[in-house]
Image (cartoon, rainbow, N blue to C red):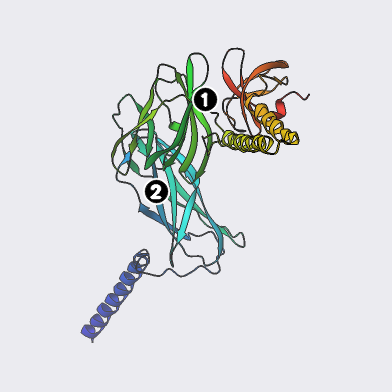
């Protein structure tokens, strides 16, 4: 009997140990999110963790000054919610391009992509603190993904480097005109893909800047100006092409033109071309009228000679002076959002150089060339 009781006691102990082992293993099995479907939270009375984050894409190497992306893979165990928001903090040696991510989704995960610029070789990603915004404003625990170190390297460029690191930098068109007695101004339109365009800086120029810019994400179309000495025959600079992994040299020949610059998207003098066409039509009309006078001997046709000739003279010989109002802004280029380099302190006359739609090109008393809006011209 004692042997039987002892055997029963041993069996009971083994059974209790097995239950304890299975209880300790069960929670560990639920941590593997890729293999186990986490049940959706339906009725949560206290804050709980409902977001699970890890890195989906981190670059192996980043150039200092390069825009790079980091993608966070997120699993949410709540069926219906308003949004997933992020708070980024504790970054080192980085500039956050946009704190709002670009989001995509598949059947199970959310993929949020953030963009950064490396500003130092000692760089670390920020901590990503994710918060679920619930439909019923129910509170949940935030989930934080710790930032990782980024491998950043610096370029060793030549002196003509423009500080631009991009997928591409293409010159669409350019134009050079006189700025003052000792300088010319060159204006070019360029498209730039995946770059921090604010870093653009050309060497050995008197003055420079972006006149206008349009962009989609990190792709830009810019109008840029540079004021250089009249002894400079070429505007040359280089940028680093990330896709080709090498420096690309760009050269713009500076051929001074008397034609006026019109808009940021078209550097050719289209308005002047239209007026030249009108002058040509008027000249043809005057010539036909002249032939009619010779043939029919009727001098009534002289009106068809003098009227077109008067029109041609009115275009070809514009007023040499123009009056501008006090406080009028003098623009570097004929663009409403362009650079203002001087304001009229009083009402005075300036020499008129040319005009395009809505703008008049004038020569200032210091011999610099600028543009005035027609609305700032004195009313007569």
Report helix, strand or loop for mark 1.
Answer: loop
- Would you identify the image quadrant in which residue 308 lies? top right
- Would you identify the image quadrant in which residue 288 lies? top right
Locate the C terminus by quadrant.
top right
Q: In the image, what residue occupies the spot 57% across and 27% down?
A: 339
Whether 7 is drawn above or below 109: the answer is: below
Residue 183, x across and y down, in percent: 48, 17
Residue 142, x across and y down, in percent: 50, 53
Viewer-closest of 153 and 75: 153
Mark 1 Cα shell of 10 Å, populated few (<14), some (14-19), many (≥20): few
Mark 2 or mark 1, earlier in chain: 2
Q: Is residue 202 visible?
A: yes
Residue hosting label 2: 70
Q: Is residue 373 visible?
A: no
Q: In the image, what residue occupies the spot 46% across and 70% down?
A: 39
Say whether residue 243 is left or right of residue 315: left
Report helix, strand or loop for mark 2.
Answer: strand
């Amino acid at each position: 009997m004692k042997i039987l009781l002892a055997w029963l006691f041993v069996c009971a102990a083994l059974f209790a140990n097995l239950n304890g082992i299975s209880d300790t293993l069960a929670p560990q099995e639920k941590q593997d999110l890729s293999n186990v479907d986490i049940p959706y939270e339906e009725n949560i009375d206290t804050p709980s963790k409902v977001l699970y984050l890890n890195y989906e894409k981190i670059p192996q190497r980043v150039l200092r000054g390069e825009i790079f992306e980091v993608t966070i893979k997120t699993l949410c165990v709540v069926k219906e919610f308003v949004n997933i928001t992020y708070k980024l903090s504790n970054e080192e040696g980085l500039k956050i391009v946009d704190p709002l991510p670009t989001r995509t989704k598949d059947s199970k995960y959310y993929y949020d992509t953030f963009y950064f610029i490396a500003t130092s070789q000692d760089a670390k990603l920020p901590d990503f603190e994710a918060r679920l915004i619930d439909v019923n404003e129910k509170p949940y625990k935030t989930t934080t993904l710790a930032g990782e170190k980024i491998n950043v390297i610096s370029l060793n460029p030549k002196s003509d480097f423009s500080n631009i690191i991009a997928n591409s930098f293409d010159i669409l068109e350019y134009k050079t005109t006189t700025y003052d007695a000792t300088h010319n101004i060159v204006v070019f339109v360029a498209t730039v893909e995946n770059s921090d365009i604010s870093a653009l800086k050309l060497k050995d120029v008197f003055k420079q800047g972006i006149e206008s810019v349009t962009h989609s994400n990190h792709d830009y179309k810019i109008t840029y100006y540079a004021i250089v000495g009249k002894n400079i025959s070429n505007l040359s600079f280089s940028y680093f092409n990330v896709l080709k992994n090498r420096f690309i040299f760009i050269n713009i020949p500076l051929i001074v033109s008397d034609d006026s610059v019109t808009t940021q998207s078209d550097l050719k003098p289209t308005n002047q071309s239209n007026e030249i066409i009108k002058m040509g039509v008027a000249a043809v009309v005057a010539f036909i009228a002249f032939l009619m006078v010779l043939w029919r001997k009727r001098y009534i046709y002289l009106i068809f000679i003098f009227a077109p000739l008067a029109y041609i003279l009115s275009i070809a010989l514009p007023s040499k002076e123009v009056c501008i109002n006090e406080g009028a802004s003098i623009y570097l280029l004929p663009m409403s959002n362009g650079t203002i380099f001087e304001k009229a302190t009083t009402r005075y006359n300036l020499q008129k150089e040319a005009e395009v739609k809505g703008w008049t090109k004038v020569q200032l008393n210091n011999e610099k060339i600028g543009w005035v809006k027609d609305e700032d011209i004195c009313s007569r």
